[in-house]
Amino acid sequence: MPNYNNGPYLRKCLDSVLNQTFSDFILLIIDDGSTDDSISIIKEYDDPRFVLYQKEKNSGIVDSLNIGIEKLETEYFVRLDGDDYMRKDRIERLVEFMDNNSDFGICGSDMKVFDQDDYSMAYGRNWKENKAHLVFCHNIAHPSIIFRSSIFENKEIRYRSNFYLMEDYDLLYRLRDVTKYTSLEEQLYYYRQTARNEPEAIVQRKKETYLAFYVRILEDLGCYYPEAEKVHFELYKNVSVSFPFKQYKEHCQRILTANKEKSIYPHKELEEIVQTTLNQLKYRMMDKAKLSFLDASGNRATFKYYIQSKFKKS
């Protein structure tokens, strides 16, 4: 558990660990140079299973996670953030799945988001779809994950800070041929979402990070061309578009053609994900009057689906 100045939330988090139905665990807390009362709160818990490691100075979550990996002595490695908490049977359910599914090295779960907002989040079950989805983003809740520790025996498999705030996507992308991953259809993890008002510079940096990551993905497929990362970004993200619909459609075909040659992703699942993403873009563009019905498909089925979806929304 990485921690940095989570004092107001720590007791709820640590109590949820203490109350787990699965008791054979070690909670390794990596404190990232907290300046609040985090340390005194952690030391209130007189339990030999709680192990505190204090970093001399703040160096970020990537470093904290890697310190935890280096200290692994257990069969499994479970993620937890210091401002979140978990259902009392979370570890038991995750360990049970891993014990019964030796071909999976990663398993997450659905999440309940709370605090500033209150809603549920469900994630991918089918490992082939999860792998194919990596062409756009990872399809698993990173804080909810249990890892099989043997994955990290390869010293190259560590979190990296190459991509700003995308260490989870980067890790899962590099693990795509190492192991399978899935999520349990249970809300085992409670994720705190606090109010954010991010400066424009941070928003822009996140976008640039995504663009850089997409260059990597498209180069790995062998279908990169100038501005391909921007087309890819606008295709997947709910942002303003800069290109005609035909160009996004051609981009999708490039991805599928390249994957047939390189077999990086399960092809049937990739086709479905790419087509779904293209359809979503189509309706976004139609909503913004940037695409006519005829240009979208030229058939009655699309018109009928679009009208039905508009009535459902209203």
Image (cartoon, rainbow, N blue to C red):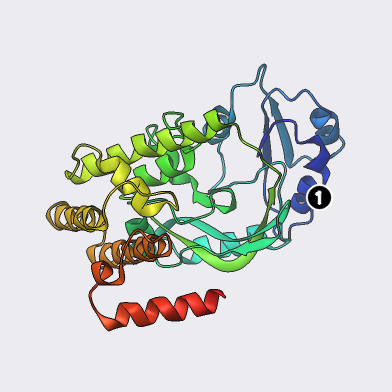
Q: Is residue 83 left or right of residue 279?
A: right
Which residue corresponds to the image point at 78% horizontal and 51% vertical from the top-left?
A: 18
Q: Which residue is at the front of the view, 26 or 241? A: 241
Considering only vertical position in the picture, is 73 above or below 279?
above
Which residue corresponds to the image point at 43% horizontal and 32% vertical from the top-left?
A: 163
Q: Which residue is at the front of the view, 42 or 230? A: 230
Determine which quarter of the picture holds residue 22. Answer: bottom right
Question: Badge 1: how crowded within 10 Å, few (<14), some, or many (20+)?
Answer: some
* Residue closest to the far top: 56
How far across and how far down the image is residue 152, in percent? Answer: 44, 40
* Residue closest to the far left: 261
How far across and how far down the image is residue 69, in percent? Answer: 53, 35
Query: Which amino acid type corresponds to the residue marked 1 in the rendered image?
Result: Asp
Q: Which residue is at the front of the view, 303 or 192? A: 303
Considering only vertical position in the picture, is 185 above or below 205?
below
Q: Is residue 207 left or right of residue 260?
A: right
Count of numbered circles on the image: 1
- Can residue 191 be seen here? The reply is yes
Q: Which residue is mark 1?
A: 15
- Can residue 175 be seen here? The reply is no
How far across and how far down the image is residue 278, in percent? Answer: 31, 62
What element does badge 1 sit on? helix
Q: Is residue 187 left or right of residue 104?
A: right
Q: Quadrant of the N terminus?
A: top right
Q: Is residue 294 left or right of residue 4?
A: left
Q: Which residue is at the front of the view, 159 or 197? A: 197
